[in-house]
Image (spheres, helix red, strand yellow):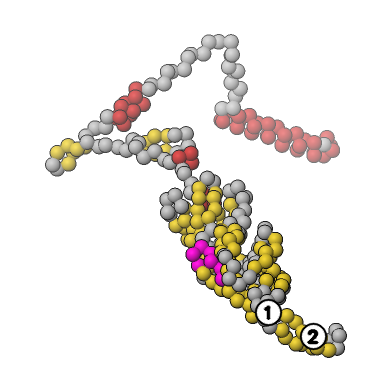
Amino acid sequence: MEFLKKHYEKIALAIVSMMMIATAVILVDRLGLEETPARRIDTNIAAATPLDTNELLQVATLLKNPLAWRTNDGPRPFIPDVWKWNGTDFYRAGDEPTTKTNVVTDPAEDLNWWVASRTFPVKFMSVASEVGTNKVFAINLPGAGTRFVKIGDPPIRQPIYGIMEEFIVLRYDEKKVKWFNPAIGGETVSDVSVLTLQRRSAGVVKEIPLVVGKQVLESEPVARYQSSVTGEQSGELKQGSKFNYKGRAYELVRLDSNLPLLIFKDIQTQKEYKRRPRVVQKF
C-alpha cells in the first residue's frame, strides 16, 4: 500500500498510456491501414488499350454526309454551312474576308484642312512721278520687286499663290489728313491716298483699294492642308487653286470661312469632297 501511495501518479499515467496504445491498435485494424507491399517496378506492365476511333470516324462521316430528316411531306436533306479558317478568322465558304492588302484608300481622305485670311500681296508704295497729269505709281509685287505703272497701262500678269492674275490701274484718289501729334505738340499731315486696282483672278473681277504704304487684307480666305499620313503641308491655296497629292491632281472649288466650308474635287474623276476646315486667324 505504501508503494501505491508513493507512485500513484506514475501508475495512473502508465495505465492511460496503455489504454491509448490499445485504442490506436483497434483503429488501425478497423480502418485497414495495414502496410501494403510496394509495387515492383522491374515487372512487365501490360500495354495500354488502343483508342477506339471508330466512333470518331462515324461522327465525321455523318457531318460530311448527314442523314436526311423527314417531315410530313417527305424527307429533306440537311445542308450545313461550310466554314473555312484562314489562320485568323472563320468565314463561310464563298464569303472570303477582305484583307487590308486589298483595300484601296482614297488619298483625299488623308488631308486635314485649315482656313484663314491673308494679306493682299500687292502693296502701293508711293507716287513715283507727278510730272504732267499722268502720274507714275510704284507698287510691289511678290517675287517681282517694284513695278512702275500708270492709269491705262496694259494689264499686269503676275502669278499670285500659284494662280495667274491680272491687274489694271483704275484710278488714283489723292487724300491727306491732318491730325494732332502729341510727340511734336502740333498738327501733322498724313498721306492716305488710295490707288484702286482692278483684279481678275480665276474668272472673278474685283476692285482692290490700296492705301499708300499700307498692307491690305484680302477679302477672300485661303486654305492649307496637311497630310495625316505623310506629314506633307501645302502652300496657301485660294478658290480655284490646283494642287497635287500622291500623284493625283485636285482643284479647290469653294472656300468659305464663315460657314466654314471647303470643297475640292479630283480633276481626273470629277469627284467632289466637302470638308469643314478649322478656322484660324492667320498662317
Q: Is residue 157 magenta?
A: no
Residue 200, percent from left and from top: 53, 66
Residue at 56% in and 73% down: 207
Q: Nearer the viewer, residue 189 or 155?
A: 155
Image quadrant for the C terminus? bottom right
Q: Which residue is mark 1?
A: 193
Return the x and y of residue 119 as percentages of the image width and height: 65, 68
Residue under circle 2?
A: 188
Tell me the quarter of the picture where residue 59 sits: top left
Residue drawn at x 54%, y 53% as measured from the top left: 243
Question: As drawn, is 1 to the left or to the right of 47?
Answer: right
| Nearest to the observer: residue 168 or residue 241 | 168
Determine the residue positioned at 60% across, 54% down: 234
Q: Amino acid at mark 2?
A: Thr
Residue that appears at 65% across and 72% down: 216
Q: Which residues are magenta?
A: 197-204
Give left or right: position of 191 versus 115: right
| Most foreground residue, 27 or 144 | 144
Please, what secondary structure does the residue beneath circle 1 have?
loop
Q: CA distance from mark 2 to mark 1?
A: 15 Å
